[in-house]
Amino acid sequence: MKYEVLSNFATIIVMTDKKVTEGKSKSSTKKILRSKKKSADKGMSLEVFDGIYLKLETVLQKLSKKGSKLTRSDLDLLTENLKEKPRQGLIFKKNSIVSMVSILDDMFSSILRHYYSQNHQKLSVESKSISFAELDEITKIEDAKNHILTKEIDQILLNEGVKNRFQILQKEMGIRLPKNQDHIKEINKLIKTRNLVVHNSCKADKEYVSNYGEGKIKIGDQLRFTNKNLEDSLALILFMGGYILQLCQLKHKSRQIESRDFILNDVIHLLVKKNNFAYLREIYDLSKNIKLNDSNKKVIVINYCIGQVKQGKKKKHILEILNKEDWSDISPEVKLCLLALKEEHKEFYTLLKKMIKDGIIGKLEILDWEIFTLYSKKPEFRDVVKNIIK
């Protein structure tokens, strides 16, 4: 099975930023645009934000100069673009939803293709048949196999709905999905929203109102997308995608799959980094109920505890979690995190200085490791890392 689809889950969590969609200052928006140009290559329409701020630049410069006067042309330009800004934000949000569902479809397609290529007997009778017209386009046996697999997958993805996809995962493939049924409902809602964006001019229909309206929306109303909606949807896709791929990895082993790291380590790290804590407990519980090597397990525990600290949990609560594990044989990196979580500050700074001196920790680690956010406002920490981050 090909797991390159995983890279999409790392990308999608940064596809939406509230600074962009809220239309903050010109300088902060341009900075965000520069940092997300690669996402545009994935199908996002981030370039729509370039024009609006660049066109206003001259006007804003005039406003900043004492005694400057705006011409009629300047005022027209300012008014026109201020009206345009909300529309551009909506385009971005719509594209985000479409991209999220596309990534979800890509994940299901990869899983199903791998499964049915190994279990031909599970293919439907209809998919196994090939018409004479289709035979004219097939020149090799491999093409015929690929045609049959594609036919089966298209049938599942396009016609049978999300419910059937999850039934295949559970009943045929033996994958244990999260017990929380709200996750499945939210996935269905996201896919339904995507269909309305693409096929119904972003207007609610009877099915949407009945299943997801909660009495707050009527048939024909325009769907509204807040930053919170998008951030929650991104986190849901990241969690559910990582969770399903992880269990597929453990269930259907091969040399390639066994060589991979524990997928949910990346997922929990990104969720903690984005301050989205809704799924941390489920990942933590899963890590305790599957065969997992010690180093991967400890990374999950560390990230889970960082999430607890960021939610305001007290030291006593964190120590209760940490004390369930054996920390006698750990790497310097894990030890540093452990010292931070235990609030053993003197030992933390001693080890941090040594690891910086030894070249184990540099600018990349300081900026990426979420454990350091717990110290980022402390003067002593800033003093220690000031020569690394310039």
Image: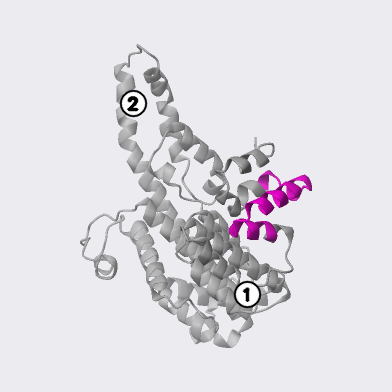
Q: Which residue is denoted by mark 2 in the rendering?
A: 77
Does the magenta run of residues contain 347? yes
Colouring used for the render: one colour
Residue 206: % across, % down: 24, 67
Label 1 is placed on what type of residue?
A: Gln
Label 2 is placed on what type of residue?
A: Leu
**Looking at the rendering, in which quadrant would you find the N terminus?**
bottom right
The crowd level at tag 1 (other Cα within 10 Å; few <14, some 14-19, many 20+) is: many
Residue ID at (46%, 81%): 167
Query: Is any part of residue 187 visible from this angle?
Result: yes
Q: Which residue is denoted by mark 1 in the rendering?
A: 249
Residue ID at (60%, 71%): 323
Residue ID at (59%, 72%): 246
Nearer to me, 323 or 202: 323
Q: Is residue 390 above or below residue 342?
A: above
Nearer to me, 68 or 148: 68
Does the magenta run of residues contain 79? no
Residue 227: % across, % down: 38, 51
The crowd level at tag 2 (other Cα within 10 Å; few <14, some 14-19, many 20+) is: some
Query: Is any part of residue 2 visible from this angle?
Result: no
Magenta span of residues: 335-364
User: Given contact means CB atoms under 8 Å apart, are the residues at marks 2 and 1 in contact?
Assistant: no
Alpha carbon distance from label 2 to label 1? 55 Å
Residue 383: % across, % down: 64, 38
Overall secondary structure of the magenta stretch?
helix
